[in-house]
Amino acid sequence: MNWHLFVLKIGYFIAVVNSAVIPDSEDVKDQGLYTDTDHVTILTVKNFEKKVYGQPQAIIVQFYNSYCGHCRAFAPKFKSLALEIESWKNIVKLAVIDCSVEENNAICRDYEVMAYPSLRYLHERYVKGNGNVGEKISAIDTAENLKIEIIKKIQHEQRIGRLRMSQPLNIAAYATIDAVLSNVPVNTMYTFLMFESENSTLGSELTLDVNDYKNVSVVRVYNDSELAKQFGINNVGLVAVKRNHETLKFGISDTNPTVQNLLKSLNAYLLNNRYVFPIRNTDFNDFSNHNNNDNTHSKQDLDAVYYSDLEKTIKTSLHTEITRHKILTGEPLGVLEDYIDVLITAFPFKHNNLKVFLTQLNASLKSKNQWTGAEIYDLVKALENSMAVYSSDLDYVGCKGSQPQYRGYTCGLWTLFHTLTVNSYQKEENLGPKVLKTMLGYVKHFFGCTECSEHFQAMAEKNRLLDVQGNDKAILWLWIAHNEVNLRLAGDVTEDPQHPKIQFPSAKNCPECRLARGAWNLKAVFQYLTRMYDGSYIQMGRTARSADTTNSPFSNLDIGMLSLL
C-alpha cells in the first residue's frame, strides 16, 4: 500500500493566542486581531460596561477568539465593513472583544458565547441584566452581505419604535412632491427621492451613508408609484428636490446601479450647489495587514519541542478555553476530567508542581457533578496562587509566530497532543488511543474555533478515530492527520508567511523519512516522531539541542493494522 497517498480530512487548526494583560487604562490601542485604526471599538473587561450599556446608538459586538482560524479569516471582512459604514456610527457602531484574553473571559461567559466569531446586536440604551446577551446575527461570508443584514435589522428596529435618530428607512407610495416634502424635517434643504422596489436595500444604504449630512434627506419611493410615473421611472431612479420644488432627475445608466455610483451623483449635485460636507475621520488604511512590524522570529529549530510551549498551552486551556462555559456538567465535565487525567498520566513533567497542581485540580473537579465556568476559573487561580506551577517568563518559543496573529496556541495544542501520544507509547496499553479520544472530546467541547471543531469531529468520524488500537497507531494517526491539515492550509490566509505549511518532517530535517518519489518511510518517520516528542528531548531553554539517533521500535509495528486509521 502507498502510505504517502493515505488521505485524511481534518478541521482547520491554525491560529494564534493573544493573552496579553489589559493595561490599567480603559481603552487599548490594539488587542488580538484589531487596532484602533480599524474603525471598531475595542472592548475589554475595563471598558465594556461604559462602552456598551446606555449608549444612544445600537452596537454590534463581535465576540472572537484571536487563535481561531475562522475569526482570523473573518477579521478583514469585518474591518472592511467597519470602514464602509464609518458614517453610520451615530446609528450603529461595530465593536470587538477578544475572548482569548483571560481578563475578558468572564464577559464572554456571561454573554453565553460558545462559538467564534459570534455577532450580537445590542439596541440603543441597552441595559445590563440577567438574560440580556444581545440578539445573535449570523457571521455572513462577505462584508457586503453582512451590511445588508445590518440594514434589514435597522429597518426592523424602526418598525418597533427604536433607532428614531436615523432617517426612516421605510418605503412608501407618493403621488406628489408636496406629499414627500410634508414628511421630511422642516429644515431640509435637499431631498433625494430614491425610487426602487421594496426588497431593494439601495435606498436604505444611501440614507445611512448620508445620515450625518445636515439638512439633507433621502426618501424611499416605490418605483411603481404615481410619482415614479411622473418622472418616467420604472426601475431604479434618483431625483433631487430642493425646498422650492426645483427637481433634477439623475440619469441611471447601469442596469444594476450601485450605492457607490448613486452616492457619487448625490455628492456631485450637492457640491454643485456649494453644500458644505461634514468632516469625517476616515483613514483608508490597509486593513488587511495592520500589524506590519518586523517581528522576525529568531530561527529556532522548529522540529524541537519546548517545555514553555507545552506549559503555556495547558495554562491557556485552563484559563480561557474551558472556563468560557457558563455551566459544565455531564459530557463536557467528563471530558475535562479525562483531559486532566491524560495530562497527569502521559505528560512529561519537568518539575513536580505542575503535576501536583493537576492532581489537586482533578480531585476537586471530581467532588461535584456540576461546575460553573467562573467556579473552575477561581479554583484554577487559587491552586496556582498556592504554588509555583509554571516556569517563569512563560511564552511560546517553537510555536511563536512571526507576528502575534500567527501560530501560538493552536500550534501549542497540536504539539501537546503529539507529545502525549508519544509519551504514552512506553506506558499502559492503549493509553495513546485514549489520548486521541480525549483530544476529540476537548476539540468538540472546548476548542475556541467552531468551524475547526466541526471539521475535526467530521474527520474523526469518517476516519474511525475511535477504532484506533495501540499506542503506536495513535502516534501515526495524529501525524497523518496533522500533515493533511498542513496540505490543505498551505497558502491559506491563516498561514504564517515565515513558517509555511509543509509535509512534516521535511526532507531536509529527515532525509531518511522519504523514499523514492516522495513516499514516506514509515519506520524512519516513527523513529523521528518518538525522538522529537519524547520527554527527554524536550527543550527547557530557547536553544535547540542536536538530535541523537536512537533505535526505532517501529519494526515491531504491524503496518497492516494502519488500515484501521
Image (spheres, rainbow, N blue to C red):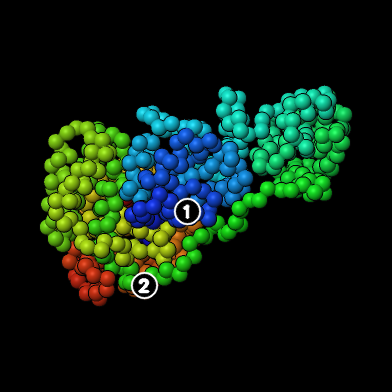
What kind of residue is marked 1? Tyr
The residue drawn where x is 38% and y is 30% is: 129
Q: Residue furthest front?
A: 187
Q: Nearer the viewer, mark 2 or mark 1?
A: 1
Q: Position of residue 120 (x, y in %)?
A: 47, 37
**Camera-nearest residue between 460 and 468:** 460
Element class at badge 2: loop
The tag earlier along the polypeptide, 2 or 1, is 1
Pointer 1: what residue? 34
Q: Where does the N terminus fall, quadrant-wise?
A: bottom left
Rendered position, 484 above or below 456: below
Which label was assigned to residue 471?
Answer: none
Question: What residue is disc 2 on?
Answer: 298
The answer to whether any part of residue 501 appears in the image is no
Give residue 353's position: percent from left, percent from top: 13, 56
Q: Of residues 41 and 369, which is closer to you in this image?
A: 41
**x and y percent of residue 495 in the render?**
45, 60
Q: Residue at x 48, y 55 (%)?
A: 35
**Of residues 501 and 169, which is closer to you in this image?**
169
Residue type highlighted by circle 2: Ser
Report which quarter residue 252 is drawn in.
top right
224 relative to 480 in the view: left or right: right
Residue at 25% from the left image edge and 63% from the top image edge: 393
Compared across the picture, whether 386 is left or right of 120 comes to left
**Label 2 environment density (alpha carbons within 10 Å; few <14, some 14–19, many ≥20):** few
Within 10 angstroms of label 1, few (less than 14), some, or many (20 or more) residues? many
Front-lying residue, 565 or 449 = 449
